[in-house]
Amino acid sequence: MAAVRRAVAPGEVGSAWGPALGRVWSFIRSQLGLWSNGHNIFVYQHSDEPGSPILCDFGVEVTRAFGTVGEVYATETPSGEAAVAVHRGPYGRLNEAYSAIDEWMAANRRESAGYSWEIYGDPMPDPARTETTIVCLLQ
């Protein structure tokens, strides 16, 4: 994916993603063939320190690797076993999918490896039909 990284205070992702993702899309539009219907993906590297900034890669799925240009660089989602939940509905209710993953991890004695990401499906006219996939990397 093509991404821009930001250190974001907890609770501030909503104000940080727009400008960062705007830089990514400006870059993608300047690179013929780099994008082919890929989705926006936000990758979060969570800190062990409560209240510490979260490292966020605000990105877009692309067709190939490329060299870093300014703040935009090529990266991948972390690999490994993960817990996944698909949220259908408005973005303001994504916490429900995260809660479902937390409950599953507790019930199955699994722990997070400190990374999660959101894959945003195509927006729908009816927000109740918008789909977002939440992924939590497991230890």
Image: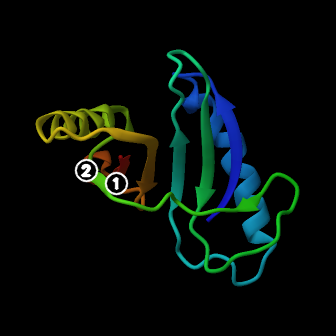
Q: Which of 135 and 19 is in front in this view?
A: 135
User: What residue is shown at x 53% (from left), y 48% (from top)?
Assistant: 43
Count of numbered circles on the image: 2
- Going from N to C along the chain, the mark reached first, 1 or 2, is 2
Residue placed farthest to the right in the image?
A: 70
Q: Residue 51 vs residue 136: left or right?
A: right
Which amino acid type is marked by label 1? Thr
Could you classify mark 1 by the number of other residues whose Cα lies within 10 Å: few (under 14), some (14-19), or many (20 or more)? some
Look at the numbered disc 2 and give the secondary structure of its residue.
Answer: strand
Could you classify mark 2 by the number of other residues whose Cα lies within 10 Å: few (under 14), some (14-19), or many (20 or more)? some
Q: Do the residues labelled 1 and 2 touch (CB within 8 Å)?
A: yes
Look at the numbered disc 1 and give the secondary structure of its residue.
Answer: strand
| Residue at the disc numbered 2 | 85
Residue 133 in the image, given as x and y percentages of width and height: 34, 54
Q: Is residue 109 above or below residue 26?
A: above
Residue placed farthest to the top in the image?
A: 51
Q: Nearer the viewer, residue 138 or 31?
A: 138
Which amino acid type is marked by label 2? Ala
User: What residue is shown at x 70% (from left), y 60% (from top)?
Assistant: 25
Residue 65 in the image, given as x and y percentages of width and height: 70, 76
Residue 133: numbered disc: 1
